[in-house]
Image (tube, coloured by chain):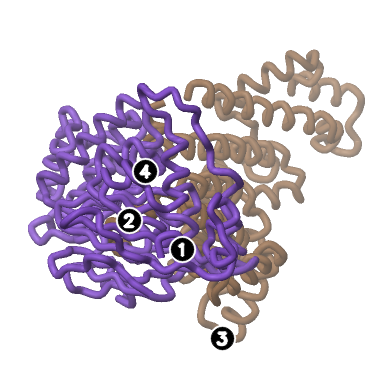
Chain colours: A purple, B brown
Amino acid sequence: MVTSASSSNESLLEVQDLKTHLFLKRGVVRAVDGVSFDLAGGETLGLIGESGSGKTMTGLSLLGLPPKPAGRIVAGSIRLGGTELVGMGEEELAADVRGSRIAMISQDPMTSLNPVFTVGSQVAAPIRAHVADGNSRGAALDMAVRELDRVRVPSASARARDYPHQFSGGMRQRVVAAMAIACQPEVLIADEPTSALDVTIQVQLMDLIERIQGDTGAGLLFITHDLGVAASLCHRIAVMYAGRIVELAEVEALYRDPRHPYSQGLLASVPRLGQRKRLTSIPGNPPNPLSLPTGCAFHPRCPHATEQCRNEAPPEVTLNDGDTLSRRVACWLEA
Amino acid sequence: MLKRIAQGLVAIVGALLIVFVAQRLSGDPVALMLPMDAGEEDFAAMRSALGLDKPLPLQFAIFLGNALQGDFGQSYQWNAPAMQLILERLPATLELAMAGLVFALLLAVPLGVLSAVHRGGAIDRAGKIFAMLGQAVPGFWIGLLLILFIAVELQWLPAFGRGDLSHLLLPAIALGWYPVAAMTRTLRSSMLDILESDYIRMERAIGLPERAIVWRYALRNAMAPLATMIGVYFANMLGGAFVIEVVFAWPGVGRTVVEAVFARDFPVVQAGVVLSAVVFVAVNLLVDLSYGFIDPRIRHD
């Protein structure tokens, strides 16, 4: 089996054949089932797919936080700047990785802030935990106010004393972002950070995230089901289906010429301005995670499925998208 | 808040009304007061002296007026105002209730939190058994066992009376026994919810130490439901520690009221009951106020 295309030495984050399974009473869910990608500093990689495709679980796995007690990373490797994270102890992960080197902006700003602590103290918490000069409460709070300023919370020093319920949804998401970037992490995971917000607020937040990334040079893993948002923000996009990456390509190449039938279906279901073509949807439903189809998990919904697709999982093949670019597809049509 | 205070006043007036009615239902007090050979005229004179010949609503108005001034009449047994007798015993009851509450919290908070953190583990299972025992075994029986083993057999602590800390320990345990169970279970279930919440996941994702997440960030969120229980049980301990006070011969309000019941010393009983009602209302008001400190969302409403 051919694995990752470009695991150059410069990449900040290298994920190899990561498998995170959920051990439920009803059976085992292979939520992440052999995912490989890499991410360079300053790069934005989009992780797109339907809900249940394993995008969020991939993000949580990077932090070593698959949902307890059912979730567990069962195989694979996550290397961050040369450090192996899989198998690292819980306390070491908390002290040296989470928040300080990899941070996550979570999905729902309305529930992601602790209701009984001031916003300032919540932004200061990771600083106190990870930054050496942030040991004293006052110093950490000053730094927290600077972070709130950085995410453009108006009159940050006064608002730091307020509680989350006194903020609007968009402002709360900024606070969450401030918590995530407070310790200048090398990798930032944004898990559908805009899906709970109004469209205008979404745009502001996207700009903010882009600017933060520009400032810090962090690698950004952008998890979304919104193809439009992904197109505007990402350099490369990984399309996930049933716990696997079915196609990974430069954003333009993917949108111009999707190769995996699932990518093709996804893009055909997005409306485009100026095109009066009828929207098509992918037939069928996402598979039952407890009993995935044999062979290629997409085969029951795939218009091109063959006998081989039903019996054998397709290998990941690397295709050339021009001189320097490459893409990876897991489909028998390309094998 | 004003609404709460008004509700509290209604509750206290209600308690006064019940006390008043119970007093009228319990028979003619004049018959108890006068010697066996008193004549009809003596009865009439005594009734008019006590105001018992007036219409009932008027009697209630007078009773209410006196009650509001803290006047529940003279104790029949002791030549002293009833309320004064009760108030003299209040510090002892307060001391015991506080000690019982502290004991309950010292046990319930770690047990509830650890049960949630190690759900299904040894502490959780032990906590479940303990909670069942706490609910099923009455406090006075625990009190008797404590006296039997700790005080009589081992002679570690005194069995009864009020004095230094050693006197306080056994009755406090017996009194705090029951609330431990309920508080542990409440705290466990709210901690379980909170530990699954998005903000705790966020706090884990930014690498806060697990100890701080549990004991600081999660626990403060679990304090509001606990405060409700603290209020209910503390008020109960203050007003309802009759049995424990009797078992340990604790010179508090409860024991005084029980003695007054046996002596048919109605004014003292009434003063005790009304004081309990006032204490109950006051404690619940304090709990309402405490919500604002625990949860800023309530403070800003």
* CA gap, disc 2 and disc 4: 19 Å
Label 2: which residue? A248
Q: Chain of mark 3?
A: B
* CA gap, disc 4 and disc 1: 31 Å
Q: Chain of mark 2?
A: A
Front residue (pair B288, A321):
A321
Same chain for the residues under marks 1 and 3 in the image: no
Q: Is residue A262 left or right of residue B134?
A: left
Front residue (pair B163, B240):
B240
* CA gap, disc 1 and disc 3: 81 Å
Q: Nearer the viewer, mark 1 or mark 3?
A: 1
Label 4: which residue? A192
Q: Residues within 10 Å of mark 3 (few under 14, many from 20)?
A: few
Q: Residues within 10 Å of mark 4 (few under 14, many from 20)?
A: many
Same chain for the residues under marks 4 and 1 in the image: yes
Residue at the image point whose x is 82% and y is 35% from the top:
B34
Label 1: which residue? A332
Q: Position of residue A324 (x, y in %)?
A: 16, 57
Q: Is residue B51 left or right of residue B98?
A: right
Mark closer to the chain start, 2 or 4:
4
Residue type, label 2 = Leu
Label 3: which residue? B154
Indicate the secondary structure of the residue bearing disc 4.
loop
Residue type, label 3 = Leu
Indicate the secondary structure of the residue bearing disc 1.
loop
